[in-house]
Image: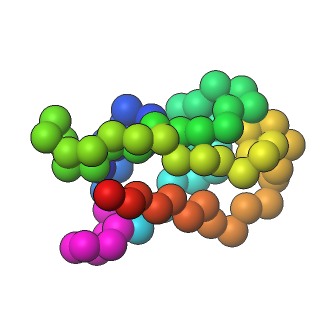
Amino acid sequence: MRLAGHEVAVQGAHSWRVAVPLETVQVWSAPFARTISVQIGGAEGGEGKARLPIGLLGHIADLAFLDVSASH
């Protein structure tokens, strides 16, 4: 799985979970971004955008988790 073009380790087989520090997402994304790119399954896999919470990359300091879902 790639998040914003960066390969990330996932947990799970059919349903995945990825833990990425907020500071890392801030570095990988444009300021005040509303989405982040997600690629599943390498070159043959699907690619899409996941919505980010409003203000995530601007003012939010406390975030327990970010849930990203993919549907076919």
Numbered range of the magenta stretch: 10-16
The reply, left or right, for residue 4 in relation to residue 8 is right
Quadrant position of the C terminus in the picture:
bottom left
Residue 69, relative to residue 50: is it above or below?
Answer: below
Q: Is residue 24 visible?
A: no
Instruction: Please name whichever residue, 13 or 49, is drawn nearer the observer in this view of the structure.
Output: 49
> Which residue lies at the image location 78% right of the left edge and 46% below the top edge?
54
Instruction: Classify 50 as above or below 65.
Output: above
Q: How many marks?
A: 0
For the view shown, which residue lies furthest in the top direction?
Answer: 30
Residue 52 picture location, percent across and down: 65, 47
SS majority, magenta: loop
Along the line of sight, the residue nearer the viewer: 70 or 57: 70
Q: Residue at x 41, y 41 (%)?
A: 48
Counting from the top left corner in percent of width and height, residue 46 is at: 27, 44
Image check: 7 left or right of 70? left
13 drawn magenta? yes
49 up-or-down from 11: above or below = above
Residue 10 visible in rendering:
yes
Looking at the image, residue 67 sits to the left or right of residue 59; the answer is left
